[in-house]
Every structure is written in C-alpha cells, then in structure tokens.
Image (spheres, helix red, strand yellow):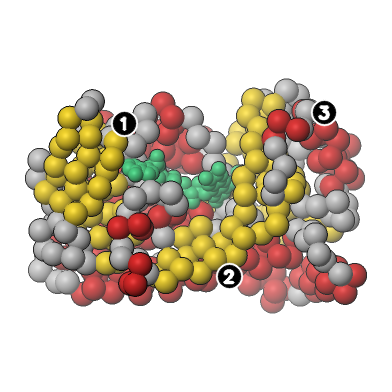
Amino acid sequence: MRKQVCIIGGGPAGLLLSQLLHRAGIDSVILERRSRDHVLSRIRAGVLERGTMRMLDEAGVGARMHREGYVHTGTYLSLQNRGFRIDFDRLVGSSVMVYGQTEVTHDLYDARDAMGGDIVDEAADVTPHDIETDRPYVTYVKDGTEHRVDCDWIAGCDGSHGVSRRSIPGHALRTFERVYPFGWLGVLSETPPVSHELIYANHSRGFALCSMRNENLSRYYIQAPADDDAANWSDDAFWDELRRRIPEDAADRLVTGPSIEKSLAPLRSFVAEPMKWGRLFLVGDAAHIVPPTGAKGLNLAVSDVHYLYHALVRHYDGDDEGVATYSETALHRVWKAIRFSWWFTTTMHRFPDQSNFDQRIQETELEVLEESETLQRHLAENYVGLPY
Ligand code: FAD
Ligand code: DHB
C-alpha cells in the first residue's frame, strides 16, 4: 500500500492526526498493535485544555464533548484538609473541559470510520525502515501475513513503549528522565463526584485527587508507594485513606461505592530529543511522559499533533520550514509542560526522604500561592494550557 503518511499507533495522537490530515486532503493509514476494544477500554486522562478543545473542534469531533463534557472554571487545592480555590475564569479568562480520554478516543474512531479512514488494528511487528532516506516504508504482520506501507513520512504516535523512538539511532537521541518514588492508585466508581470541581490535596499521609467523569461517575486517586499493588487495596481501605487526605467538608460528603476500575500508575518525567529523525516524527507519549499531576499528558500529545499537522500541510503546499523546525517548536512547549507537571508533583506529594525543612518549604509554597494572585495566575495559565 502507498500512503502519504504512515501513522504508528491508534491512541488519541495517531487518531487525531489522521483525522486532521484527512480533512486537509492528505491520506494516511494507522497501524495499531492492540484490538480496538482494548484501546477503547483504557481509562486515562480526564481534563482537556482549551487548545485541545479547539483541536477537537477543528477535527470535526467536538460536538459530543461540548454536549456531555463539564466546563470547569476553577479547581481546589488543599493543605492538611483546608482548601482554597484557583479561579481560572477570573485569573486568565479561561476554563478547562472535563471529558475523558476514553470518550475522546471513541469520538475519533467514530469520525475515522465515518470517513472510511484506514486503520489496521492488531498489527504485529510494526517496523519503520529507511527513515533517513526520502523513501521510508513500514512493514507489519496482520493475520500471519507481512504487509508493507510505502510513504513520504512516518508519524510515531505509539506511546512510551512503542517502536518509533527505538528506531532513532542511539547516537542521535538524548533522553532526560526523573522517576518519582511513588505512584497513583486510581479508582473509578459509579457514585456522584464529591465536588463539582477537582480537588488536589496535599496531606502528610500523601497526595489525593478528587476528579470526575460525569454526574454519576467519579475518578479518585491517592498517592501510594511505587512498588505497591492495586490488589493490596480493598475498596474500603481506599475510601478510608481518601477521606483522611481531603478537606473535611468533602470527606463528610463523600459517597462511596464499589470500584469499577482500580489501578496503580507509576509517575515519571521523560523527554527524548530530537522529536524528528529523517522522515520519522515522534508525537505524544512516544517522545515524552509527564507525571499526571495537572493532566498534561494527553494535552501535550494534542499540541504535538497541532505542530505536525500544520508542518505537513505546509510541506504539501511546497514549504518545508514546518517539518524542518517541528522538533524544536514542539520541544519548546513540551519542556514548559514538563516543568509545570514536575513543579505540581513536587509541591503536592510526600517524598519518602522529605526532611522537616523540605516539608515546611512545601507548606509555605502552598501558603504563598494562596496569598498571591500573581502566583495563582501563573498556575492558572499553565493549567488551562499555554497557548499554541
Ligand atoms: P497512547 O495513548 O499511549 O497511544 C499509543 C498507541 O500506540 C496505543 O494505542 C498503543 O497500543 C499503540 N502502540 C504501541 N506500540 C505500538 C507498536 N509497536 N505498533 C503499533 N502500535 C503501537 N494523562 C493525563 O493527563 N491524566 C491522566 O490521568 C493520565 N492517566 C494515565 C494513566 C496511564 C495508565 C497511562 C499509560 C497514561 C496516562 N495519562 C494520563 C497519559 C495520557 O493518557 C497519555 O499522555 C496519552 O494517552 C498520550 O496519547 P498518545 O496517543 O501519545 O499515546
Ligand atoms: C484526572 C487526572 C489528572 O492527572 C488530573 O490532574 C486531573 C484529573 C482524571 O483522570 O480525571
């Protein structure tokens, strides 16, 4: 098969890119390793930046998000059971949308299907070839038969464990990493959310987050040791621990119920540079990972797609400036989100080796934030998403 762009990975980045390219008259194929059911059952991010909303609209897939999503004009931060609000609307005249990644992925698959998009699922052994030439191609195995896609460009949208990043020669790739000594134990439950807006809680027992998907679907997280196991936590133990860490009025209101999903996610900051090598681009989690605090992962994948989409449109209009500068342009924004997620993680979590000095500094950081409109504005700007 011959396509202008071969996209490896059918997560949100790959799907959105192919949808946008299609609307611009550029043809692509998506090669996805897993089954569609698997991709659609993953529970991940929940908060969309204003730029992500704009991109979904631009791709023609924003209607259900506007109908069913929840606009949040602020969020709560708490320290030892006492909270204060960051008012995005007042501080930066903006808001975020609470709408799950699972739903975004659903909407994108529906749109791709409606337009007859080419998606190969359960594609095994996907391998990019000749990426340093102007005739790259990708091979994969489907139902025991090997296939080949000849293309102009390869978009590596295959997440942190994909094949794309590994295809860039070691001497050309620089990586930067911080692994945090804790994870997030997440629970999804069919209960009304404890709060209309999210609560990020700093507590001496560890961080907690109250989030939501809709009026009867709540998403909660608590900080847990990185080597813990979700199977060690009964639902009751989870609810008891959450209650201890959040503001008292919220703890009193908390409605609990059986978990319908429970999992532990490790926390890591990671960046690979460059994000382009020859004819291969890295997009989203394939190039960078943020700890989830502040919900930047999915949003960062979408801003990468924005830069790459515009670069490819310009290329097919005869202008190669965008493809030449993609890595530099994307990384400029990536590092700012990496910094914000690192700062928010560091400020809100309990570290095993934290001294009493470190702890007082952390508490003071939050007190200063509560008192300073300037610092709140800075947080709000980053939370709703830096412009692109
Ligand atoms: P992915 O969503 O990872 O998609 C990559 C796709 O490529 C997958 O479908 C995968 O199956 C496919 N693939 C992988 N290897 C190959 C291969 N060799 N060949 C073909 N296909 C391949 N972000 C937040 O903001 N908030 C959260 O709460 C949050 N929770 C998360 C929880 C977990 C467990 C994980 C893993 C991530 C979480 N994230 C969260 C991050 C967010 O989900 C990601 O940033 C986002 O999914 C990135 O999208 P992507 O399309 O770049 O990558
Ligand atoms: C959610 C996840 C986050 O990482 C975050 O900062 C806010 C919300 C969520 O899954 O709802």
Q: Which residue is mark 3?
A: 236
Tell me if mark 3 has few (under 14), some (14-19) or many (20+) residues whose alpha carbon lies within 10 angstroms of its own: few
Q: Which residue is mark 2?
A: 339
The spot of residue 86 in percent (x, y) is: 71, 61
Quadrant of the drawing holding the C terminus: bottom left
Q: Are marks 1 and 2 in contact (CB under 8 Å)?
A: no
Identify which residue, 67 or 217, lies in the foreground: 217
The spot of residue 287 in percent (x, y) is: 41, 60
Q: Are marks 3 and 1 in contact (CB under 8 Å)?
A: no
Q: What amino acid is at disc 2?
A: Arg
- First in sequence, mark 2 or 3: give its number: 3
Picture residue at 86% right of the left edge, 51% below the top: 205
Tell me if mark 2 has few (under 14), some (14-19) or many (20+) residues whose alpha carbon lies within 10 angstroms of its own: few
Picture residue at 26% right of the left edge, 31% below the top: 113
Secondary structure found at label 2:
helix
Identify which residue, 177 or 242, lies in the foreground: 177
Quadrant of the drawing holding the N terminus: top left
On residue 122, the disc is 1
